[in-house]
Amino acid sequence: MRNFFQFQERQTSYKQETLAGITTFLSLAYILIVNPIILSESGMDQGAVFTATALSAIVGSLLIGFLANYPIGIAPSMGLNSFFTYGVCIGMGIPWQTALTAVFIAGVLFMILSVLKIREKIINVIPKDLKFAIAAGIGFFISFIGLKNAGIIVGNEATFVSIGNITAQPTILAVVGLLITVFLMVKGVRGGIFYGIVITTIIGMLTGMINPPKAVVGEVPSLAPTFGVVFDYLPNIFTLDVMTVIFTFLFVAFFDTAGALIAVASQAGLMKDNEIPNAGKALLADSTSAVVGSVLGTSTTASMVESSAGIAAGGRTGFTSIVISICFFIAMFFSPLLSVVTSEVTAPALIIVGALMATEVRHISWDKLESFIPAFMTILMMPLTFSIATGIAVGFILYPICMIAKKDFRTVHPIMYTLAIVFVGYFILM
């Protein structure tokens, strides 16, 4: 097992990988609660979605662990599930069964692109400055989500965002958790993020800020209401609206996953010569998970940026992903316990992980205007638009333009020019 996951080469251990896996799971656990709630508003059965969410995360994480040896958790994307419910089902009036079929078709197309190594090729031709920018931008994005979940940053009509009510109990708990976790990290405590989550949860229950679970074991809901529905609705996809939905799922998930993979590989020190080892296998794992998830009954799955929490805790190999899968399996039977892992508890982990990822900015060529402007805009647009894909799109459009202006257009790979045109078309259509 040690040889298979290359423990010695990546300087890790069973204890370190296990702790990392649990840390990532705790950072992802909210998905088991939030994803069923969001998708149920489209008319889907909440219990069935809960089970589908857990099973798709188990399958995806196992695949990326064994196939690519990456410490990544795969689960339903929290951006695409909102698009599924509010944009497609409610906004466009498309039944959830048809929308789920669109997810299935997009997943199959993902698999084809992965097998043909088209996705891997695209990721590997991205200039290194943009790769560092993507990793750093996702760091800022994750920290922004953490601050939002903690209630430290809130919406404001006059200034768009502003500081929240820091005297509110949930926000106080998040701030205390942040201080504890920062202290542990600065002291050099291995697994400081994990221990920070545990200590914050205990403090929340002792002070009455978090309600103790009413039960320990819960029944696993049936998949019957959603399982296999996509096969009955395949004839319904041949409309312009549904084709647009398929393209959107394919497009956004493609670059969300690419961004997450680049960020995680960079943070874990796995990137070599501006390329990501086993990228094709990692992409095949997440695309396969998307297909499986749609058949089970959940929206598009993706490599999750929250995996960075586990990497910060020491995760370096696919064994971390195996632990994540085991945790999701156990969670199916102990779902009531998940209620204590609130967004305020995990917010400090996201804030700190974002800070760690943001250090990638130091590798950007800040002395070259043509390099740092696209990189800067990539970083800036991710948190401001609340979209990884949008940030990547802006950077990909600006980079060829800057290189043409610099008369270095021959150094730009033809794929980058093609993607720039595709992104322009995407913005016009959307």
Image (spheres, rainbow, N blue to C red):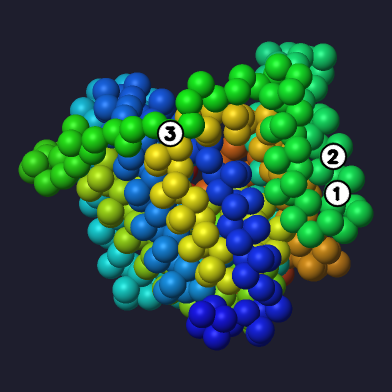
Q: Which mark is residue 175?
A: none
Which residue is disc 2 drawn over? Answer: 180
Q: Position of residue 268 (x, y in %)?
A: 67, 68
Tell me which corner region of the image, top left, top right, bottom left or bottom right, holds residue 213.
Answer: top right
Numbered disc 2: secondary structure: helix
- Which of the marked residues, 3 or 2, is nearer the chain's N terminus? 2
Which residue is disc 1 drawn over? Answer: 184
* Classed neighbour count for the residue bearing mark 3: other residues with Cα under 10 Å, few (<14), some (14–19), many (≥20): some
* Classed neighbour count for the residue bearing mark 2: other residues with Cα under 10 Å, few (<14), some (14–19), many (≥20): some
Say which amino acid is labelled 2: Ile
Vertical comparison of 353 with 261: above or below: above
- Picture residue at 36% right of the left edge, 50% below the top: 56
Tell me the CA gap for discs 3 and 1: 32 Å
Which residue is disc 3 drawn over? Answer: 217
Marks 2/1 in contact by CB < 8 Å: the verdict is yes
The mark total stands at 3
Tell me the CA gap for discs 2 and 1: 6 Å
**In the rendered image, is residue 235 in sight?**
yes
Q: Position of residue 424 (x, y in %)?
A: 47, 50
Numbered disc 1: secondary structure: helix
* Classed neighbour count for the residue bearing mark 1: other residues with Cα under 10 Å, few (<14), some (14–19), many (≥20): some
Say which amino acid is labelled 3: Val
Tell me the CA gap for discs 3 and 2: 30 Å
